[in-house]
Amino acid sequence: MKPNRSSLTNCCILTIFIFALTSTTLVTVTRAFTTSSILSSASSRTLSSSSSSTSSSLDAVTGVTRNPNFSKLAGGYLFPEIARRRNAYIEAHPDMASRIISLGIGDTTQPIPSHILSGLEQGATKLGTKDGYTGYGAEQGQTLLRQRIASVLYQDRIEPDEVFVSDGAKCDISRLQQVFGSQVITAVQDPSYPVYVDTAVMMGQTGTQDSTTKQYQNIVYMPCTADNQFFPDYASLPRADIVYFCSPNNPTGAAATKEQLTSLVQLCKERGSILVFDAAYAPFIRNPNVPKSIYEIDGAKEVAIEVNSFSKYAGFTGVRLGWTVVPHALKYSDGTPVRNDFNRVMTTAFNGASNIVQSGGLACLDPEGMKEIDTLINYYLENAKLLRETFASIQGYKVFGGTDAPYVFVQLPQGMKSWDAFTHILEKAQVVTIPGAGFGPGGEGYLRLSAFAPRDKIIEACARLKVAL
Ligand code: MLT
């Protein structure tokens, strides 16, 4: 029997209605399940994306296709995921809220010292005067600040016009990906600061993530674990166009020596790779044999870009000020200076760092400002020492980093998974840490603790860790 047209229409409407109802129910059930099992599923390394929409195509108004690179991302960004799990714990245990101590994200906690603060104040005051007022740009930063960065922080090893002042190293890493485009092969230390990999995925440089290895196709993962003193053996791995290297390292806290960096620069030259050197933690270096900049290595200007930031120098995590050095001598295979293209991105997609904040940056580089920075960094290094001592005293745990870096990297007892350790410490000690696996598959079996916290919180956290572990 052939159905008539109107019964067919009614049937379709009913089907769509039932389908919509089922999907909504499914989404609701899934959400409820996710919330209730948030901490019990902690051993999973896959981060669920808290910010991604679960709406179906049924309610889409646009006909725009989603950028396929975003569906390759295995989950949300690491630090919001940590915050989500902490908040879920607090929601389930409101009486514990005031006990939470965060040694998770590396966010500065100490107030901005007075001389540096006066620079910020002066920057704001000038804007209220006829002579001092300034508007846009320059997009590359104020000439004086670029000169002071080159002379104070690089002892004139680089030229001021090789310095691009920005709103931070993280943003500059993303801008560099725009410069490199989708066709390059990227290498990262494993574990590493998640921004390198996530922005490479967004840019379309990679395939999808292998669910077993947790590695993205087309990324060269350079293992950095206790077995190789956290320094990669790049020579034994496939060549990459772009090699990201962070020293002092986030998350491992390892600081590469002059010899190690010399060999890395040499290798990049031999293999024709561009080295992106992340020096955001340079002020923590106390070992005289650890370079604070890649340009302390002969010949580095031909292969290396350096990204850096005032965030950890001066407590500018919320103020926002960083810089990137792209030397004239660094060229693509066709002879085009990389600097030209970075300059093109900066002038097109950035309007220059805040003039108020750049005035704060200038104050950082005065002798008084540099002294204040040193005092701040020593404070955090003392915190790191207390964390190191704590883990050294707990049987089964091995501690690394924390001497030239604000991060302490702890090797967990054999077989313990890092998300399980994260959950255990949150539940038993109310201390927030970061699981090593959040920084890449090579971080499995480790935990990162940040020394950015007030001293009394560090002392309290250490006491609780000794009881809980
Ligand atoms: C970290 O915790 O790894 C850093 O604070 C994050 C950042 O600098 O963006």
Image (spheres, rainbow, N blue to C red):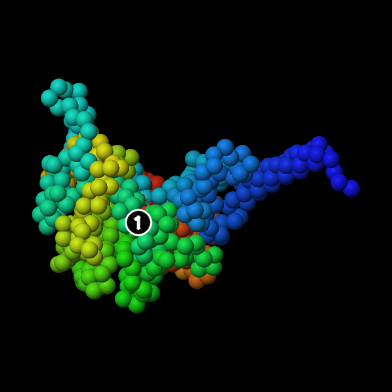
Is residue 53 in view? yes
Q: What residue sits 27% from the left and 60% below the top?
A: 277
Q: Quadrant of residue 304?
A: bottom left
Badge 1 amino acid = Gly
- Answer left or right for 5 relative to 443: right
Q: Say what secondary structure mark 1 lies in.
A: loop
Q: Where is residue 88 shown, x and y percent of the image?
A: 56, 45
- Answer left or right for 21 relative to 300: right
Disc 1 packing (10 Å; few <14; some 14–19; many ≥20): few
Q: Is mark 1 within 8 Å of ligand 1?
A: no
Is residue 189 in view? no
Give whichever of 57, 283 is nearer the camera.
57
- Answer left or right for 205 relative to 333: right
Q: What residue sits 52% from the left and 70% below the top?
A: 415
Identify residue for label 1.
181
Most extreme residue toward the right is: 1
Q: What residue sits 21% from the left and 30% below the top?
A: 135
For residue 413, above or below residue 419: below
Give whichever of 352, 48 is nearer the camera.
352
Q: Quadrant of residue 192?
A: bottom left
Q: What residue sits 20% from the left and 44% below the top?
A: 140
